[in-house]
Structure formats: structure tokens, C-alpha cells
Amino acid sequence: MALLLRIEAYDIAFRTQNGAQRVVYTSGYEKQFAGMKTASSQSFIARVRASLPDLHPSERRLAEAVLSFPGDMAGYSASEIAGLAGVSNATVSRFVRKIGYASYEEARKAVRDEGQTGAALHRLAANAKTGGNAVASHLEQSRRNLEKTFEALDEESLNDLVKAMQAAPRLWIAGFRAGYPLASYLAWQTCQVLPQVSLVPRPGETLAETAASFGAKDVLVMIGLRRAPKHAATLAAAALDAGTKTAFIGDAPAIEALPVTWRFTCVTASNGPLLDHTGVLAVCNMIAARALERSGAKGRARLGRIEDIHDRFAEL
């Protein structure tokens, strides 16, 4: 039976054409494949779910425990997982072979690798701490993230970015999933002194319709966080192709690897199920504050007009 298998291809190549660097990218395509999708191309969770109808009752009990807390696989031994699920070690061995892994260690490595993407499900644990010193632990992790992020922050690059933002005919600020509210925050703050700010994605508009407006003198600030959709890197590549100067803020490897003009890598480590974006927000705040500080007479005049209209509208 032939199945339609979608293959995502976001290959980005850089070629020299007429003496200039050009970005060539593809967004995705479909191909016909005979047969079923191979187990090796499936995620750990997808393999477990696909196996459920064919499992022995004890194996199914193990599968249900693993699906509830897949992150435990990364840190627990086979015996510990067996104890959590109430099954034997032999059941664990049979189970991992049934879902396509040669050994428990191979399955555990797959879970560990998938956990690095930032998926909350992979970061949940059956014995997660819910009380005690949770507040202090969270505060300490956020503090470490801030320190490490700002230790790597290059002030000259930040000032160069702000200068380019102020000179650009249009400033594009993009973010997807967790990055979208942070992009919205940065756009809201900077629009107080920069009238040409556009938040991406825009309601009712495709990314292609947005990318068609990228200009050679524009600036794109991309908030790229782990588990960003693949078209985030494609959009950044389209901006580079148009000659738009691009800045990267975040921790998404696929976007960070692009030859952007400015790069501000943020530490988002967490001891809980959600990544900690404290450092990302702090960098956005610093960029916005610097934009206001360096806005000059035009910026102050715009701030004044906004306050006058606030009074007229009685909004605040």
C-alpha cells in the first residue's frame, strides 16, 4: 500500500552569484513512497504509541507509564523504569526491542536527544519536586541563565544593532511559538520611538507575503527559541536572500547557524518541564531600552505625541 510521506527539506545553501552571496532555500516537499514509514524515522513517543495495539498486558502497562513520563527514560536505569511501571527487567528488554531499538541504552539515548529539543513532555518526571525549595531553585536557575547570557553579550554588537534599527526603512521583529510573545514585547517597546516596526507573523498573512516586502536596507530581528517551526529558519534565510540585515536572539540551533549580522545567544536551561526564557526577555528589554535612549530628538518628539494622544483618548 502506497502512503504519502511528507519530507521536510530546509536545506540552506550559500552561493556566490555575480560576486554577491546568495541564500538558496527550500521550504518543503512531498514524495510518494511505497510501504510504511520506517521505525527509525519516528520519534520515541511515536514508536511507543504505534506499538500499543500489539503489546502484551505487562508491556502495555510499561508503555503507558513511559508515555506519561518519557523524560524518566533519560535518567533512569532499566531496573528503575521496571520498578516504576511494576514490571520485570525482561519486560523492559522485550519492549524496547519491539519498538525498534537494539537495547535499552539506545532507547534512552533517543529520549535524551529528543529532550534537548525543549519538549515539555520529555522534561516531566514522575517524581518531580512540587514543593519545598521550588521557588528558590527556580530563582537560582533564572539568575544563572541571566549571568551566562549577559557574560556572552557583546555591547558593541548590541549598539550596532540599535543603530541599524533606527536607520532602517522598516524594522521587522519575528517570533514563533514561545518566541512570539517576546517578539511582540520587543516590537511594542521599540515602536514608541521607531514608527516603522512590523511584528511577524502578521494576522491573515502568509510568510511569503511578508517576505516579499523584505528590503535590502531593512532589519529583521528574529527571536529563535528551541522547538521553533522549521519555517522560522526559512523566513530568516529569505531575509538574508533579500539583503536584509538580520539579528538572532535565542537558542534555536537551526536559526543560530545562519550567517546573520548580529547574534545574541541566550541560555535557557531549566530544572523543570519548561525552558527558562528570563535571559531572552532581558536581552529584548536591553535592546528596547537602548533604542529609546539613543532615539534623539525624533524619538522624544514621538514619545511626546504618544503621551498627548493618551491624554486625548483617556486610555490610561
Image (tube, helix red, strand yellow):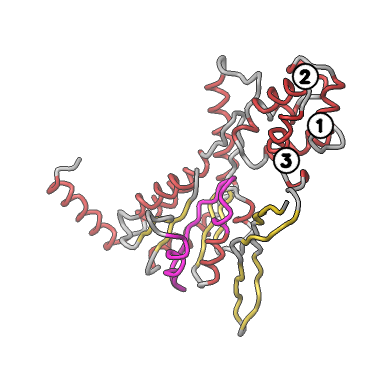
Nearer the observer, 8 or 164: 8
> Residue drawn at (57%, 58%), measured in percent from left and top?
233
Drawn side of residue 169 relative to residue 232, left or right: left
Which residue reaches farthest left? 312
Q: Earlier in the sequence, mark 2 or mark 1?
A: 2
Q: For residue 242, which numbered disc appears in the image? A: none
Whether pointer 2 and pointer 1 mark residues with C-beta atoms closer than 8 Å, the reply is: no
Describe the element under mark 2 as helix, strand or loop. helix
Q: Quadrant of residue 2?
A: bottom right
Please name the residue that numbered disc 1 is placed on. Answer: 96
Residue where numbered disc 2 is placed:
58
Mark 2 and mark 3 in contact? Answer it, CB < 8 Å: no
User: What amino acid type should be assigned to the residue bearing mark 2?
Assistant: Ser
Inter-mark Cα distance, 1 to 3: 16 Å
State the image coordinates of residue 47 (x, y, percent, origin top left): 73, 37
Q: Nearer the viewer, mark 1 or mark 3?
A: 1
Callout 3: SS: helix
The three-letter amino acid code for the residue at tag 3 is Asp
Mark 1: give few (<14), some (14-19) or many (20+) Cα within 10 Å: many
Disc 1 marks which amino acid? Answer: Val
